[in-house]
Image: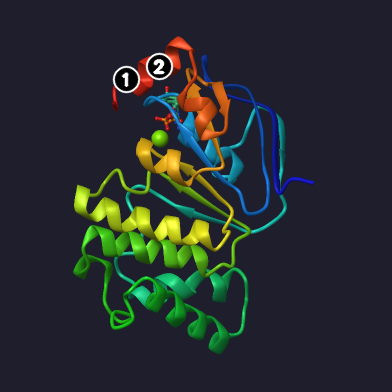
Amino acid sequence: MSLLEVKNLKKSFGDNVVLEDISFNVEKGEVLSIIGPSGSGKSTLLRCITKLETEDSGIIDFDGTFGLVFQNFNLFPHHSLMKNITNAPLRVQKRDKEEVFAHARDLLKKMDLEDKEDAYPSELSGGQQQRVSIARALAMNPDILFFDEPTSALDPELTGEILQVIKDLAAEHMTMVIVTHEMNFARNVSDDIIFMDGGVIVEQGTPEEVFSSDNKRMKDFLGKFY
Ligand code: ADP
Ligand code: MG
């Protein structure tokens, strides 16, 4: 059985049909990238799966824990990094304080931020803030990590460092669903790719299949990057 199954998902905002008949599965250990033009429904899809939006119809079958990493980091500005990372494991998951703090320190170390646990988000670079938000997501011991354009707010040199963190997680077989405009990254790191346009899945398959597609919308989209 798949870890996540989405079947015939539909979502509108008023008269605006934003997602139509979206179906796909994510297997344990898989990396799925979702690409497509702005406004094609990628964020709404992630928001429906992660319960930040309610779908109109269709099935979302997932009963694990998820972590979510946003474009703009969404850290609590008035909390230290440690508090940002430990808040949900302590308050939502009600885990043991010592275990949660030890886990958080391991994650900060993994993200190269071991000396920063008492710092505040505003004292960090964008790349460092995004690494904290990845640590915060991992602190929940998620079954799936969702990323919504994790590098879109970053300068190119900081983008590379975040993409490397995600590649390292893929090498550890973390299950991930990644909305991204980084085409070379998507091609290299993904087991499967979904190309969305106008609220529907236009192409779906391995990177080789999707990037060699003859579909006009797919080719027009890729033409903007290559
Ligand atoms: P993408 O992430 O691919 O850029 P979005 O999912 O953000 O696309 O948006 C898809 C469409 O849904 C757009 O037309 C957008 O204006 C609309 N939309 C997204 N969120 C809302 C909302 N909360 N209320 C109304 N319309 C929305
Ligand atoms: Mg979006």
- Residue at position x 37%, y 48% in the image: 150
Q: Is residue 183 left or right of 211 when viewed as pictured? A: left
- Residue at position x 38%, y 24% in the image: 37
Query: Residue 181: where, in percent of width, then height?
Result: 36, 36
Ligand 2 image-quadrant field:
top left
Please name the amino acid that badge 1 sits on.
Answer: Gly
Colour pattern of the rendering:
rainbow
Label 1: few (<14), some (14–19) or many (≥20) C-alpha neighbours in 10 Å: few
Label 2: few (<14), some (14–19) or many (≥20) C-alpha neighbours in 10 Å: some
Q: CA distance from mark 1 to mark 2?
A: 6 Å
* Residue that mark 1 sits on: 223
Q: Are marks 1 and 2 in contact (CB under 8 Å)?
A: yes
- Residue at position x 63%, y 32% in the image: 55
Q: Answer yes or no: is residue 74 visible.
A: no
Query: Residue 209: where, in percent of width, then height?
Result: 54, 26
Quick one: 180 or 77, which is closer to the camera?
Answer: 180
Task: Give SS at disc 1.
Answer: helix
Please name the amino acid that badge 2 sits on.
Answer: Lys
Task: Give SS at disc 2.
Answer: helix
Query: Taking 191 as reference, is 103 above or below it?
Result: below
Mark 2 vs ligand 1: CB below 8 Å: no
Query: Residue 43: where, in percent of width, then height?
Result: 46, 36
Quick one: 97 or 174, which is closer to the camera?
Answer: 174
Q: Looking at the image, which residue sits at the far top?
A: 216
Q: Answer yes or no: is residue 68 visible.
A: yes
On the image, which quarter does residue 38 sit in? Answer: top left
* Residue that mark 2 sits on: 219
- Residue at position x 31%, y 76% in the image: 113
Where is the C terminus found, in terms of image quarters? top left
